[in-house]
Image (cartoon, rainbow, N blue to C red):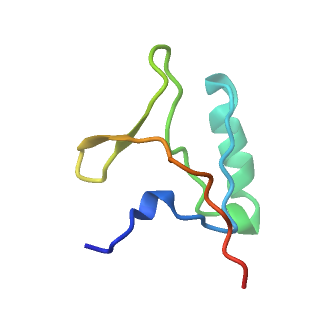
Amino acid sequence: MLGYDPYYLACEGRVVAVADAATASDILTRWQLLPEGKAACIIGRIEAGGSRVILETELGGRRILDELEDDPLPRIC
């Protein structure tokens, strides 16, 4: 075990955008045309109902991500 949960670590240089489902594919296509956006992908969706985040793993499992207890602070180099 790593001793920390890698899903809660800050990762500089990443962007998470929330877009309407009707325009998400077009936005993604345009983003991927940028040199920095070649690896861009859709990683989730917003559904009606409870307010929680469910992680879908590469193996097809599902896991509810708990809320952070404190605000994560950026590492100062």
Could you tell me which quadrant the C terminus lies in? bottom right
Q: Residue furthest front?
A: 70
Question: Which quadrant would residue 60 be assigned to in this image?
Answer: top left
Q: Is residue 26 above or below residue 23?
A: below
Q: Is residue 45 above or below residue 5?
A: above
Image coords of residue 36 (percent x, y): 72, 67
Q: Residue at x 74, y 48 (%)?
A: 30
Q: How many marks?
A: 0
In the picture, measured across the screen, residue 41 lies left or right of residue 3, that is right
* Residue in the foreground of this view, choosing between 64 and 36: 64
Q: Is residue 55 above or below residue 21?
A: below
Could you tell me which quadrant the N terminus lies in? bottom left
Q: Residue at x 72, y 79 (%)?
A: 76
In the picture, measured across the screen, residue 75 lies left or right of residue 47, that is right
* Residue in the foreground of this view, choosing between 29 and 72: 72
Q: Is residue 5 above or below residue 28?
A: below
Image coords of residue 63 (percent x, y): 30, 42
Image coords of residue 39 (percent x, y): 58, 62
Q: Residue furthest bottom?
A: 77
* Residue in the foreground of this view, choosing between 9 and 48: 9
Q: Residue at x 63, y 36 (%)?
A: 25
In the picture, measured across the screen, residue 16 lies left or right of residue 6, that is right
Q: Residue at x 38, y 43 (%)?
A: 55
